[in-house]
Amino acid sequence: MKPTSVPNASAKGESLLTPHDLHLFNEGRHYRAYEKLGAHGTEVSGVAGTMFAVWAPNAAGVSVIGSFNGWNPTAHPMHMLENSGIWQTFVPAVGQGAFYKYHITSAQHGYAVDKADPYGFRQEQPPSTASEVWELPYAWNDHEWMEHRGRKNSLQAPISIYEVHLGSWMRDRGRQLSYRELAPRLAEYVNRMGFTHVELLPVMEHPFYGSWGYQTTGYFAPTARFGTPQDFMYLVDHLHQHGIGVLLDWVPSHFPTDAHGLAYFDGTHLYEHADMRQGFHPDWKTLIFNYGRTEVRSFLISNAMFWLDKYHADGLRVDAVASMLYLDYSRKEGEWIPNRYGGRENLEAIDFLRQLNEQVYKEYPGVQMIAEESTAWPMVSRPVYLGGLGFGLKWDMGWMHDTLKYFKEDPIHRRFHHNLLTFRMLYGFTENFVLPLSHDEVVHGKGSLINKMPGDEWQQFANLRVLFGYMFAQSGKKMLFMGGEFGQRREWNHDAALEWAVLQYPHHAGLQKWVEHLNHLYRTEKAMHEQDADPAGFEWVDCNDSLNSVVSLLRKGKSPDETILVICNFTPVPREEYLVGVPHGGLWRELLNGDATLYGGSGWGNMGGKEAQMVPSHGRPYSLKLTLPPLAALFFKADIKADYSAPVTTGRQTSLQSDD
């Protein structure tokens, strides 16, 4: 099949590529390539069928094979459009549900391979690997959410993220639930627990279930394991209608070597670097995108736009950004190629990320782009025009590592590791941070969160309660992986549902209730979220009491009336008449107490609040003499006028209070 140039056929619809499309695609500036490449139903000369288009510039020939032609590589040859590298053909009478692949013959070595469609909207359920012709009409009902979501996703809004793996969150007698079955259950639970967003581990099609979606082959196809593309749209739509944002985990950092995927696509290293020192990831044994290739940029940026456009995603969490930024990532000396200046920075990847974020925020200003970036790379979440990478938020991996390291210590030794708690605030506002306790911390032998905690059962749960309390007290958005909120004992297993049965036990149910009330406090008290990314929103009262392993701090809203005092005792020793300086006199009401019996605590507390005395302390004109319960976080507010209708739980009493 010799490549020939054919004129642009007269057709109805948007499936045929115009010369302008080809120009933009080859320049790396076609941000809606999914509207033209792939398989699209259309009409040519009044005949209905499907137009197929695929980028394979170094192929000697390309044809469409499928269920409609007996998988015969000679039945429907494709033709190259101009010199674009894009092959196209129209196949009459082919429509929704037809399975297909591209049969590609290389210009060199006689190499031939059958590839799934890189732009395919649906793929066969694994282990089958064909693409499926599929259109994406859907009647959305989330107009109110979409109109106002910019406020829900802003840096000033409370963002508390529940990280979910759809296949193992909940099952029915061992059977995985479909997208539509998950929708009402997930919405009800997330709303009851008070989370504002869910973040879904990659839903893009992946052949190896044990990769959790991080080894993607079908970048434009939600996995068929749980239903159709419209079924996944229903899940997003349902969550939106219940006021819940949807963030998608997205993997532009690497892709697997599966024969039907992107690897060695047209008999050459098309999507990946040819040099293994740049194109192969030694940790994951996967391939690395060639970010300097313009058509690869069109593919990746179009893919990001696709999930925001067709599936109404509220943002993307970009996986493994550090591996993209550094040419020597996980490589020894001599195993990597320096950039043109002799440095280790991947200049092409940096430029790609900036282009990606600029275009996303230009087209969808109400979403969030979130970087999983584990190094000290500067200005990850700062605008491109200031020299940043342009993300909206960045995971604070340093906080996560330091905090978990601290909590693994026996409380008697914590005084010697106090800096692990306080170091974060030396850099806490250099980025817009998310505090993540993610799936990565409860797999590969690391154990569950509850099993990381020292002590007997009571102390383990008390430790986890004060850990969560401290997380919510810190500046930054919050993220918790499923199961952590009720203290699942077993390490996460992607082949089984969470251990929901443990909620029959008081310690687990109490921890779950604590997280619910922390979320409610975080959402309803402006001081807890309004200045999450502003140094004006955080102030230490005392960060130096290492002897007692106690920290105290203020969270502040934009109004002087919006101030929350937080004290955390990281030992099992109760402390009475503990002096804490405060900026205001009057009654300081105890909003939450992690040692309340409702949560499984021992019941130490301050009887609902304390009157501030005009006794200076910690450089402040007033002070409180408090009882600090063992292994507990306390939250106080002075002269509360804000609505707070959640159960207000203090040490020796539980009441439902609301101020009118």
Image (spheres, helix red, strand yellow):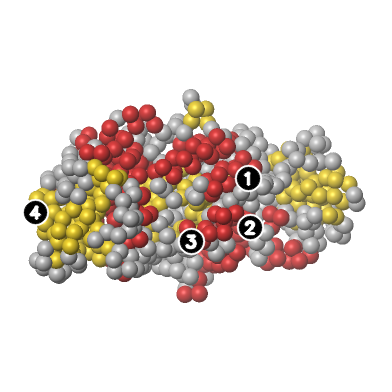
Q: Quadrant of residue 465?
A: top left
Residue that mark 3 sits on: 151
Q: Position of residue 476 (x, y in %)?
A: 36, 59
What is the tally of numbered marks visible in this picture? 4
Horizontal relation, residue 411 to residue 199: left or right: left
Asked whether residue 64 appears in the rendered view, the answer is yes
Q: Secondary structure at mark 2?
A: helix
- The amino acid sitting under disc 2 is Ser
Residue that mark 1 sits on: 221
Please give the name of the residue rendered at 47% of the width and 73% of the height, measured from the top-left corner: 387
**Residues packed near mark 4 inside 10 Å, few (<14), some (14 to 19) or many (20 plus):** few
- The amino acid sitting under disc 3 is Arg
567 up-or-down from 226: above or below: below
Mark 2 → mark 3, Cα distance in angstroms: 25 Å
**Residues packed near mark 3 inside 10 Å, few (<14), some (14 to 19) or many (20 plus):** some
- The amino acid sitting under disc 1 is Ala
